[in-house]
Amino acid sequence: MSDVQLSGVPVSPGRASGPVVRVTEPLGEPASTPPPDDLHEEAARIAPAAQAVVARLEAKAAAASGDAATILSTTAAMAGDPALVSQAEQLVTAQNIPAARAVYEAAANFTHALASAGGYMAERVRDIEDVRDRIIAQLLGIEPPGVPELDQPSVLVARDLAPADTAGLDPALVLALATEEGGPTSHTAILARSLGIPAVVAVRGLLANDARALAVDGDTGVIEAVDPSAPPVVAASGGPIEWDGTGRTSDGHRVKVLGNVGAPADAHAAADTGAEGVGLFRTEFCYLDAADEPTIAEQRKAYTAVLEPFRGKPVIVRTLDAGADKPLAFLAQETEPNPALGVRGVRVAFDRPDLLDRQLEAIAGAAADSGADVSVMAPMVATAEEAGWFAERVRAAGIARAGVMIEVPAAALTAREVLDAVDFVSIGTNDLAQYTFAADRQLGAVATLNDPWQPGLLRLIGLVGDAARETGKPAGVCGEAAADPLLAKVLAGLGITSLSMNAASVRAVGASLATATLADCERAARAALAAPTAAQARVAAREA
């Protein structure tokens, strides 16, 4: 590889080089034979194995702090999930299979449900696989896959990294990260930014090289071999991130810094990290694995648990984002030839307005129960007419503020008319990118097209920002584009008034905004819009 450069999607800035350490590959499928001699004894091994994994992860969480501690604690909770353990125990006795195989198959049921849900939920599949492999390794008495002990500063190379692996990294020993899979919304990207470690993901051909030392450029996405005898280049550490908790530029222009949440644990993590509220509350968790639609009372209770940490603060709740490409059993939808372009998001509500009305009643009740300042928005809106239809139903349910997601290019192109129909909009950059570039956001082979710095995407965002300024209404960004501290300033310069992201990035973005004036942000935005490529947009914005 000495004469070859590889490239991927840069997700955390900085440049570092040093010796390569490869992360252990995930475990393969455990055997389904021989059958256990004593089924009940074999099933009884699963819970203690899961608790041993929980204990190790909780010990790591106790030794960590901030975002890393939160992610390790969340992973520990997943490892001890009674539903996973119970299902695996039942599989041992029902199918006469070893405990390790039963854990593998039980986890597969969970990952299938998450993958079917799509979007954010599909991105959590890697979390379940990590927990699965840790429990199986405990049952088999072998070392779990993951990051080996580092005895010198090194560049980590992996197919992908599990959340617990990433959260446990020591920035003093990890010079940089490079993965063959993953994308801008992966845990690797989120935690690398939080820890200040240069990182590049979706590097095709990375694992096929035999280089003993690599240079990783987290600004350009370029990876190249370097002399293994050369001393490591240690990326400068940003140290603890200081932020006063109010999102604004250095000259006082307000840009709210909010959290993305999809479950009670996410809400507590966002609140603990100082998020000013919630810019995207994904309600799909309430519907996963449900054979029947949850009752209004069940929904109300579930939503209240998420809203409670934000009493008195703004929370934007997104109504059910499901459909043919995110199937839910009780919807009973027909098969579609191209489900990503079919009946999904708000289009389900057009067919089943009763479903939407019941959810809105539950949201209104949860708002009253929690004391949060709740607004509601619809996913996958394409036209101003659709936006107006949704807003009418929201207001009829007694909820004062109605908005919509801008995830479809048509909605961005008609943002002025859409904003006339609603109180606010929020740009889902993850979906807007994949629809703009016809590139599946889950597919590593096209991850470069989903780079949020793509000028084509930035120009669409700019149209929405212009419309927001003209109408005097808020326009937020709730995709992972909001989590990039440099891009956050560009978005502010494009007219975006709030940024919503995973908890790990809240402080870094808030601190970044505080280093620039609004005029600085506008100058960086103009430079990025004029660039011909994503890589050049990054450079132009940084120089501006």
Image (cartoon, rainbow, N blue to C red):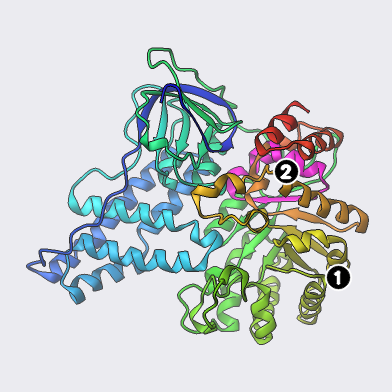
Left or right, 334 with respect to 420, comes to: left
Q: Which image quadrant is residue 484 in?
A: top right
Q: Residue at x 42, y 54 (%)?
A: 127
Which residue: 86% across, 55% down? 468
Q: Which residues are magenta?
A: 486-509
Q: Residue at x 30, y 51 (%)?
A: 134
Q: Is residue 495 magenta?
A: yes
Q: Residue at x 45, y 53 (%)?
A: 74
Q: To which residue does mark 2 refer? A: 455
Indicate which disc, 1 or 2, sits on the residue closer to the N terminus: 1
User: What residue would you read off at disc 1?
Assistant: 421
Q: Quadrant of the N terminus?
A: top left
Query: Residue 103, image x and y in percent?
Result: 27, 62
For the residues marked 1 and 2, what is the alpha-carbon distance in whole angstroms? 28 Å
Q: Can the viewer see residue 504 in this picture?
A: yes
Q: Examine the rendered structure and indicate whether residue 451 appears above or below residue 121.
A: above
Quadrant in which the C terminus appears: top right
